[in-house]
Image (spheres, helix red, strand yellow):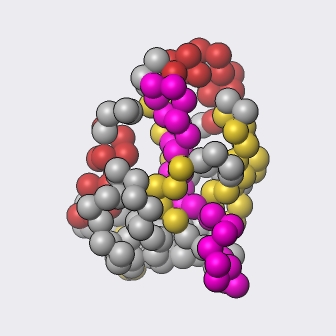
Amino acid sequence: MDDASEYYRNIEKWNKWVKNGGKIVFLDLPIGSYEFEGKKVSIAPTFMGHYFFVSPRTSHPLTKNNHPFDFFCWYDEKTGLIEPILTRTIQGEGWNAILKTGIPGDNDGDKNYLAAAELELENGKIIINNLLLDNRVGMNPVARNYAYDLLFSKSK
């Protein structure tokens, strides 16, 4: 879903669809606060500039086969350069981590800043993915595989 306003315009329909086994994937939600079935989530800018890496070490099925540096220094086909892959973080209680990030000074890791997160609703799920995939899936095999799995894996 490209725009959260579509979800909120038809919230009852979408929640029913997800609970019955559907999956909604939000790609790169704008900065702000959101609520999905009573679970609040905030999207905020990354700290100290944009990030060139995120961690797949979350035990999530979408990243279970990835290595620690798979999500690191991806090539951007449009610019012809290695470009940042994260400009906004996700934080919310009750959301499962798909891809993690952090902030300087959070050495104990208790803040749970995420690049991609999942909310399970009965038989389906809502996913927020703020990892930048545009212009990266053609030349970065990990980006291509992640995008494919994100969009086409079964919801449960």
| Range drawn in magenta | 103-130
**Left or right: 19 in relation to 156:** right
Q: Which residue appears at 45% of the width and 70% of the height?
A: 55
Indicate the position of residue 153 as horizontal and vertical percent values.
Answer: 31, 39
Indicate the position of residue 135 as horizontal and vertical percent values.
Answer: 37, 61
Corner quadrant of residue 94: top right
**Residue 88 visible in image:** no
Q: Quadrant of the C terminus?
A: top left
Picture layout, residue 3 above or below residue 55: above
In the rendered structure, does residue 87 fall within the stretch colored magenta? Answer: no
Q: Nearer the viewer, residue 32 or 70?
A: 70
**Left or right: 115 in relation to 111:** left
**Left or right: 27 in relation to 31:** left
Q: Which residue appears at 34% of the width and 50% of the height?
A: 61
Q: Which residue appears at 41% of the width and 67% of the height?
A: 57
**Residue 56 visible in image:** yes
Q: Nearer the viewer, residue 123 or 47?
A: 123
Picture layout, residue 37 above or below residue 147: above
In the rendered structure, does residue 119 fall within the stretch colored magenta? Answer: yes
